[in-house]
Amino acid sequence: MTLTTSNTIAPQLLNGQLREVGKIMAGATLVLAVTVLLFTAANYIDATSRGAEIAFGRGLWMYTIGFLPWFALAPVVVIVSQRHLFGDVSRLRRALYTAILTMAVFSALLLNMLFVYAPLMGIPTSEIAGRIGVQPWIPDILIFIIAVLVGGALGSTSKQTSKTVTDAPAPIDIVVKSVSRMDVISSDAIMAISAQGNYVSLLTQEREFLHRATLSDMRASLDGYGYIQTHRSHLVKSQEIASVHRKDGRVRELTLRNGAKIPVSPQGARALPSIFANSDKKLTET
């Protein structure tokens, strides 16, 4: 059996990063929406207790405009902090990115206060500029610090995830020889392997290949690639399982994504829950 390696790590990392950015943006939006509601409610309660008449809707509008830049800035701060302020970063680079990030964020907040918030609230720009002090900036400073700390926490988590993906074994190519031809099959394409005497049947999405090897040989060669032994004569890649079928109190058969049926022994059935517990797939039984 001839083995060669190929690499599919880069697409996995890119997809993971895109999902992570999406989660950061969604999380930041949710937290800021809750923050706006809390500030509006607190302002309304305080005003009402003093006997002042204030519309809840106007307070909501006021705080929404005030916090509006953070809906874009908070994800940026988290992502920049995650990638450039923590981990294996030199002190000079960390200081440079911190200074640039701080100046950019608070400049954007100041511009929003002067040229968006003030006109919409009917306050002259010159008047609000003269009233700017330290106290109005406290919520912004706290949000900035929290976003930086969240970025640092996510940075340590993403480094562990990246290391796990990078350390995963690269796919191998299996050379299948016959009298008239030679086929090269990537381990990524093999959905299941079945014993056929001194041969094994390699099942792919398109067809089956008969390969001169034993099931134990293939199990050893593909250790760590996500294959489980569901039966003494069958290996199955766990990612390819579409559903499992129960009969007389236990799982008896698997259906793969291409519709192929694979038998399951009692010992193989016991291995299934642990496999699915460590993946994003749900164990669907029929």
Image (tube, rainbow, N blue to C red):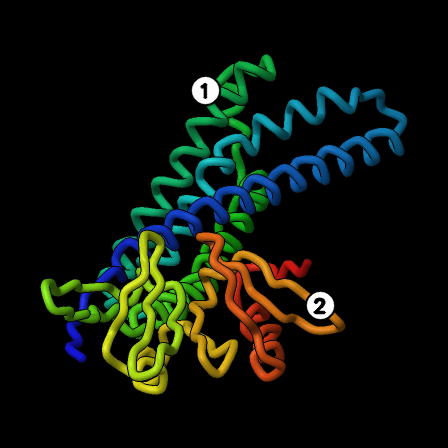
Element assignment for label 1: helix
Report the amino acid beneath label 2: Lys
Nearer to us in this view, 76 or 105:
76
User: Disc 2 marks which residue?
Assistant: 247
User: Disc 1 marks which residue?
Assistant: 115
Q: Residue at x 42, y 74 (%)?
A: 227
Q: Position of residue 133 (x, y in %)?
A: 53, 38
On the rendered image, what quadrant is the N terminus found in? Answer: bottom left
> How many marks do you count on the picture?
2
Nearer to us in this view, 181 or 257:
181
- The answer to whether residue 242 is above or below residue 2 is above
Element assignment for label 2: strand
Q: Residues within 10 Å of mark 1 (few under 14, many from 20)?
A: few
Q: Residues within 10 Å of mark 2 (few under 14, many from 20)?
A: few
Report the amino acid beneath label 1: Phe
Q: Position of residue 249 (x, y in %)?
A: 75, 73
Nearer to us in this view, 101 or 235:
235
Task: Please indicate whether residue 211 sits to the left or right of residue 46 in the image.
Answer: left
Q: Residue at x 53, y 14 (%)?
A: 119
Question: In which quadrant of the rendered view does residue 36 lie?
Answer: top right
Q: Residue at x 36, y 77 (%)?
A: 196
Q: Position of residue 224 (x, y in %)?
A: 37, 78
Question: In which quadrant of the rendered view does residue 218 lie?
Answer: bottom left
Task: Please indicate whether residue 50 sits to the left or right of residue 257 in the image.
Answer: right
Circle nearer the viewer, 2 or 1: 2
Task: Please indicate whether residue 135 sits to the left or right of residue 189 in the image.
Answer: right
- The answer to whether residue 73 is above or below residue 233 is above
Q: Earlier in the sequence, mark 2 or mark 1?
A: 1
